[in-house]
Amino acid sequence: MTNRILTYTAATLMALGGVAQAQQGVSDDSITIGMHVDLSGPLAIWGAPSTNGVRMRFDEANANGGVHGRMINVVVEDTKYEVPLAARATNKLVNSDKIFAMLNGTGTSQTLASMKILDPKGIPNLFPLTGAASMTEPFNKLHFSQFVSYKNQSAAGVRHFASEGATKLCLQSVANDFGAEMDEGARVAAEDLGMEIVYEGAHKVTEADFAGVATAIKNTDCEVLMMGTTIRDTIALYAALRQLGWDKPVFGSMVPYTPIVAQAGGGKLTEGLYLSSSILAADFASDDPVVQAFVADYKEKFGEEPTLQAQMGYVAADLAVTGLENAGRDLTVDSLIAGIQQITEYKDLFGGPSLSFGPDKHEGGDGLVLLQNQGGEWVKLKDGLSY
């Protein structure tokens, strides 16, 4: 009797051990990936096309037999760019949909809230749609970003204009995590360069009237303005400054890097605005056959022209596919992490700055570009901005 009990107990423990070792979101023939995305809120202009780009790349992978025989299943939840909804979406994706990894989540605060749920479960957070340094700092083996951080984008802009002779700096940012990080990068660079910060301002996400802010900035003696702004506030603040006759250089991050900002008021409202960006938009009108194939496929699938954000989603999904391929058939979180860390000097099909990862490097971006709005178009002025 005793031997029977011992044998039964050992068999039971082995079975339970097998269950415990089963990888959530991975079966013999599928991998489930989750996304928390703004599809209907203020950053839907980023979230919707980036989701299309992700779906397009995964559809390509699945059409070619999947990754090591597994089809990629993506489950998308709309957050409306609200932090509570991002947390709710993550809970659903983790506990109901049983995702293996989260990909390309929209927003800094939203992703931070999501990671508080993902991290204790050991679920990777891959290539979120934000350049926040907090996506990879402090280091966590589960966190990967495809961008140079906002902090370093801001610092690079400050360094560039300091090299042009600027010694006095103004800061105006949205009052959230993104704005705070942009300010931090500017302060660090200014201190290092001996620049004087003569004005610091903050505004709400919903702010629409910048006449007072523009007047306050004009009344300083600053020689360059760093804007930690998004879409509408970038247009409104920049236009207000120019209407007052303030003609000093103004720069922001990759967040306003959209046709809407460049073409506001027929391209006149933001003429001359600079951006320090971790990404470079493809010339979708070029004769490059690879780019033209992407444009044709995107238009056929979604009935609209691709955007930079669609490009970013596609790249995020391509990095995920590459990591999955490198991980091999025996797919676990650890093998996926190792697979992504093997990606070095990655060049996307759009000609953007290279990406590299490693055991100690989970912020993939290798470089920055300086852009300027000229006649309603973003024009690259410089590669390899230092930060």
Image (tube, rainbow, N blue to C red):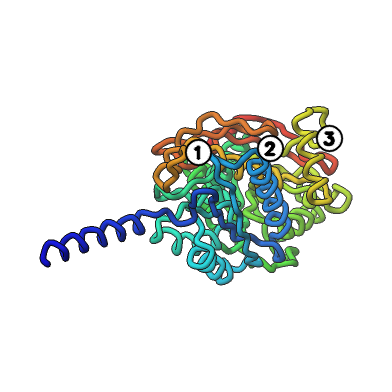
Q: Which residue is rendered at x = 62% and y = 64% of the image?
A: 77
- Label 1 Cα crowd, 10 Å radius (few <14 / some 14-19 / many 20+): some
Q: Examine the image and state in which quarter residue 106 appears.
A: bottom right
Q: Which of 111 and 92 is in front in this view?
A: 92
Give the mark nearer the N terminus: 3 vs 2: 2
Residue 201 lies, in percent from the top left, at 60, 60
Residue 157 or residue 94, whichever sits in front:
94
User: Which three-letter amino acid code belongs to the residue tagged 1?
Assistant: Leu
Of residue 165 and residue 103, the one placed in the foreground of this image is 103
Q: In this view, does 159 lie above or below 21?
A: above
Question: Quick check: 234 left or right of 190?
Answer: right
The residue singled out by tag 3 in the image is: 285
1 and 3 marks in contact (CB < 8 Å): no
Q: Quadrant of residue 312?
A: top right
Spatial CA distance of label 3 from label 2 is 15 Å
Kindly report which numbered mark, 1 or 3, lies closer to the viewer in this rendering: 3
- In the structure shown, which secondary structural element does the residue marked by tag 2 occupy? loop
**Residue 193 bears which disc, if any?**
1
What residue is drawn where x is 54% and y is 70%? 88
Badge 2 local density, few (<14 within 10 Å), some, or many (20+)?
many
Task: Identify the residue position indicated by label 2 in the image.
Answer: 280
- Reply above or below: 92 against 373: below
Q: Residue at the spot x=79%, y=48% of the render?
A: 301
In the figure, residue 161 lies in which quadrant?
top right
Distance between the alpha carbons at the discs numbered 1 and 3: 40 Å
Q: How many labels does the image show?
A: 3
N-term-proximal mark, 1 vs 3: 1
- Amino acid residing under circle 2: Leu
The residues tagged by marks 1 and 2 sit, at their Cα atoms, a distance apart of 27 Å
